Amino acid sequence: MKTVLLLTVSNIFMTIAWYGHLKHKDSTLWKVILISWLIAFVEYCFQVPANRIGHGHFSAAQLKIIQEVISLIVFVVFSIVYLKEGIRWNYVVAFFMIIGAVFFIFKK
């Protein structure tokens, strides 16, 4: 559970670093890059421990799939709440396909 929590916090920071600047297109690119790098540093402070802690319990492939699912969930919430973008039917279908990947990666 610690791994999932750390990956969730990590993905919140990464989503902000990657996409938060889209509402601030009037800012100069070099400032956006610098701020994004600073936010990404904080992201790594959660992501690296998450993978170190989780690797004993999960394989690297399982950790990656968990991270991708968390990333998609965080991104959907971010895009709706912060960017004010809607969800389309094909986004939902794609998400369920990712959930299918989770099923198969944990299948013995």
Image: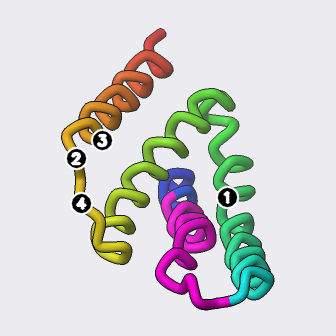
What separation in Å lies between label 2 and label 1 (alpha carbons)? 29 Å
Q: Which residue is mark 1?
A: 47
Quadrant of the rendered image containing residue 48: bottom right
Element type at marker 1? helix
Side of 27 where 12 appears, left or right = left
Q: Are marks 4 and 2 in contact (CB under 8 Å)?
A: yes
**Residue that sits furthest to the left in the current view:** 89
Mark 4 residue crowding within 10 angstroms, few (<14) / some (14–19) / many (20+)? few
Would you say the magenta stretch is mainly helix, strand or loop?
A: helix
Mark 1 residue crowding within 10 angstroms, few (<14) / some (14–19) / many (20+)? many
What separation in Å lies between label 4 and label 2 (alpha carbons)? 7 Å
Considering depth in this image, is 46 or 25 the residue closer to the camera? 25
**Residue at 47% across, 81% down:** 23
What separation in Å lies between label 2 and label 3 (alpha carbons)? 5 Å
What separation in Å lies between label 1 and label 4 (alpha carbons)? 28 Å
Q: Which residue is mark 4?
A: 86
Mark 2 or mark 1: which is in front?
Answer: 2
Element type at marker 3? helix
Residue 24 in the magenta stretch? The answer is: yes
Element type at marker 2? loop
Q: Which residue is mark 3?
A: 91
Q: Which residues are magenta?
A: 8-27
What separation in Å lies between label 1 and label 3 (alpha carbons)? 26 Å
